[in-house]
Amino acid sequence: MKPNLLASGMLVLLLAASGVHAQTAQGTASQTANAVDPGAIQALKDMGAQLQSLKRFRVSTELTGERVLADGQKLQHEASATMDVDRPNRIRARMWSARTERELFYDGKTVTLWTPAQKYYSTVEFSGNLAELVDKLEDRYAVEIPLSDLFLWGTANAPLDKIESAMNAGQDFIDEDLCDHYAFRQGTIDWQVWISAGGKPLPRKLVITNRADEARPQSVSLIDWNLKPAFGDSTFRFKPPAGAKAVEIVPRKTK
């Protein structure tokens, strides 16, 4: 799933040698500013319908994010996440990097946040579906579930009406998966998504660019899917290990 996108010099040479670079430049120039391609919007709807049809799955992501220093220099950082999902109301998510690790368990009755390094865990009662869980965790506790938009697309809350520009940018391979590439603009955010071109239109790559920052920092997520995962009910239940300490999760301050 990981083409060497960081080898930009070699990529430019390959594009120039094949003539793709010139064609891409012409195609970009011919795009109408702020045009919304109905086909690109339909692709998001089809992707959302496919996502909502999944009942049991495992999804993994490798994230590269950028941090901009005061002098404008960019630093890249890597993080990973894996989610086991059993709709409508069970999920286990693990998020880790060289600096931190945390896990989230939800069995349809309680939500538990676990930090292995400190051996702290917090539990709150909850009984909603996964989309409702995403909203509550973010709004009340400032806790974000990785790839949380996966539970939003295909629902009435998908932000289709906020898209100001949408285009089909051609096709690329993500690993050996041929994908349709789409680009969108919403407010100060530009984002791109690569969607599998086969019979199951699932997102395989996501790039987000923050135009509110002059340095244009980006995050790049590469996404892998397992649609026949082998996990049981115990996956979603948290059992405190020896030495674990329960602590209260504090709601975020509201203005």
Image (cartoon, helix red, strand yellow):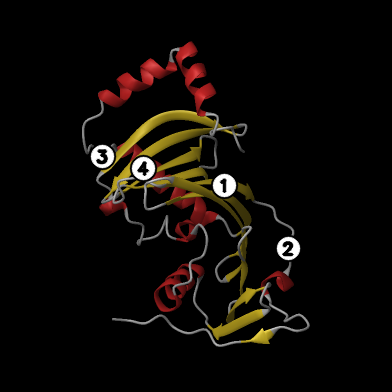
- Which residue: 73% across, 73% down? 234
x, y percent for residue 22: 37, 16
Q: Distance between the residues labelled 1 and 3?
A: 26 Å
Cα–Cα span, label 4 and label 1: 21 Å
Q: Do the numbered discs 4 and 3 sit on residues whose CB atoms are within 8 Å? A: no
| Residue sitting at x 57%, y 65% | 87
Residue ID at (48%, 67%): 144
Percent of width and height locating residue 250: 48, 85
Residue 36: numbered disc: 3
Q: What residue type is labelled 2?
A: Phe
Q: Nearer the viewer, mark 4 or mark 3?
A: 3
Closest to the camera, between mark 2 and mark 1, is: 1
Q: Position of residue 196 (x, y in %)?
A: 52, 38
* Picture disc at residue 223: 1
The residue tagged 2 is 231
The three-letter code of the residue at mark 3 reads Val
Q: Which mark is residue 124?
A: none
Residue with the mark numbered 4: 42
Q: In which quarter of the image is residue 84?
A: bottom right
Mark closer to the chain start, 2 or 4: 4
Between discs 4 and 1, the one toward the N terminus = 4
Q: What residue type is labelled 4?
A: Gln
Quarter containing the C terminus: bottom left
- Pick out the residue farthest to the left: 33
Residue 219 visible here: no
Pick whichever, 203 or 22, lies toward us: 22
The amino acid pointed to by label 1 is: Ile
| CA neighbours of label 3 inside 10 A, class few (<14), some (14 to 19), many (20+) | some
Q: Alpha carbon of mark 2 to alpha carbon of mark 3: how far?
A: 41 Å
Locate residue 242 relative to residue 56 in the image: left or right. Answer: right
Please say if 121 is above or below 52.
below
